[in-house]
Structure formats: C-alpha cells, structure tokens
Image (tube, grey):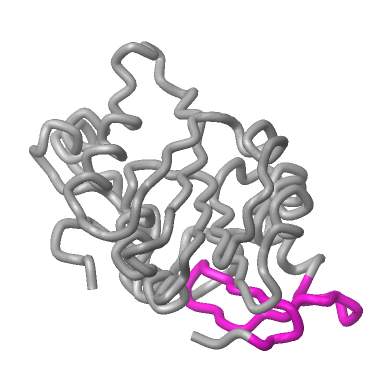
Amino acid sequence: MTTAKIRFAEVRPGAAGRGSWVSRALGHPFFAWAGVRAPRAQHTMAEHDAMERFARGCQSVVEIGVAEGASAVALRGAMDAAGILYLVDPFHLSRVPMLNFLRRAARRAVAQNGGAQAVWIEEFSHEAVRQWSRPIDLLLIDGDHRESAVEQDWNDWSPHVVEKGVVVFHDARLFANGWTSPEYGPVRFVDRAFRNNASSLWTIVHEVDSLVVVTRNGRATA
C-alpha cells in the first residue's frame, strides 16, 4: 500500500470544521510541492485501497483529473510496472500559470513514488481523446464534476476500455458522513446510467465511500 506519505480525506460523524487559519493556509498546493506537507488526497483510505486493487496487473491506465497526484500514486504503484499510466489534466485553474503549484505538487508526488511509466497529458479530456487509439484496462473519471462533463468523459473514453476492463467514478455515490450530495454530477450520472438503468451493458461491481466501479456485465472482479 502507498499510504505513508498521503493525507487522506476523512469520513467522520458531524460537520467538519474549517480548521485553523494555519491549517487552511497549508492547504495550498505550494506546501505539498515544497515538501512541507504530504499530498492531500481527495479520496479516503478505503477508496485508495480499492483503486490499488483494481489497478493491480493493469498495463494501460488513464486518470482524468489528477489534483495533487494522490490517486495517481495509488494507480502507478499497483499496476504492472511495465505498463503506462496516462495522467490527463490541463491544470488550468492556477491564477499564475508559470507558478502552477498544483501541477508542480502532482508531478512531485508521482515522481517520488515508484511504479509504471507516467505520461502526462496536459489537455482537457475532451481534447486529449481526439487522438486516442490505445486500449485502456482501467479508466478513472475524476475531472470536471458537472453531470454533462462526466457523461462526455464516459462517452468519449469508455469505448476504449477493453472487454474486462473497469471504469472508476469518484465522488459518485452517497455515503454515511460523506461529502457528496444527490446534486453531484457524478452521483446523478452513475445513478442514471447504471444504478437505475436495467438495460445498461455495464454493471456496478464495487462501491466504497464515494467510489463506484463498473464493468461490462460484471465480469471483472477486484
């Protein structure tokens, strides 16, 4: 498990406080890039473990939405060392593009952990897929959370997933003491496309916290 150097999202009863101003200030990705703190995952330890299990043995993995790189660390360390992890993120939200510390923090986190080759694709997912022709064993959709954007990522990328491959959706499920809500785009899409769609060719095969894993006809297992 690649958990020692990652700060996971917490699930606990009651509303989480905002914390001290020091804690909020340290939330800036500059401090992850500078090595002052560990990369902050947007997922829980249970979700991290699930990503590692499903990535194990995969040779071609695509992650849409990288943030500080915590999920990339999980995928890269668990997949086949001879494989390739494609990291798709435009890193466009920085106010100062030349000092994009989210991008720097992500690259630092991935570089510090061993595993498969990492290929960075700094484009929006709908742009990156235009020239895509490779098969995908595991696809993680965790980019733009608008329902229409989640659906576009699914429509664009899922045709490239191999027959027994899996697609992983983050922030796509309601769970106790969690941060998701029925209005979340990934929640709405997963409910509509799989949970409440008996005619879907894809089946939910695993769920934990906000994570949902689907595959064609339920043939893949962790």
At 88% from the left edge and 82% from the top edge, which residue is drawn? 198
Asked if the magenta segment contains residue 158, the reply would be no
At 67% from the left edge and 64% from the top edge, which residue is drawn? 161
Instruction: Name which quarter of the figure residue 106 lies in.
Output: top left
Image: 36 above or below 216:
above
Residue 115 shows up from this direction = yes
Asked if the magenta segment contains residue 207, the reply would be yes
Q: Is residue 34 left or right of residue 88?
A: left
- The residue lying furthest to the front in this view is 82
**For the magenta stretch, what is the residue range?**
194-219
Please tell me which residue lies in front, 120 or 81: 81
Q: How many marks?
A: 0
Find residue 131 and report its horizontal and vertical position in percent. 68, 36
- The residue lying furthest to the right in this view is 199
Q: Quadrant of the N terminus?
A: bottom left
Instruction: Name which quarter of the figure residue 21 lies in.
Output: top left
At 69% from the left edge and 86% from the top edge, which residue is drawn? 218
- The residue lying furthest to the left in this view is 36
Please tell me which residue lies in front, 141 or 40: 141
Q: Is residue 202 left or right of residue 22?
A: right
Find residue 63 and report its horizontal and vertical position in percent. 50, 52
Find residue 153 and report its horizontal and vertical position in percent. 69, 48
Residue 21 shows up from this direction = no
Find residue 174 and report its horizontal and vertical position in percent. 58, 69
Instruction: Name which quarter of the figure residue 53 lies in.
Output: bottom left
Q: Is residue 119 left or right of residue 147?
A: left
Q: Is residue 5 left or right of residue 175?
A: left
Image: 163 above or below 156:
below
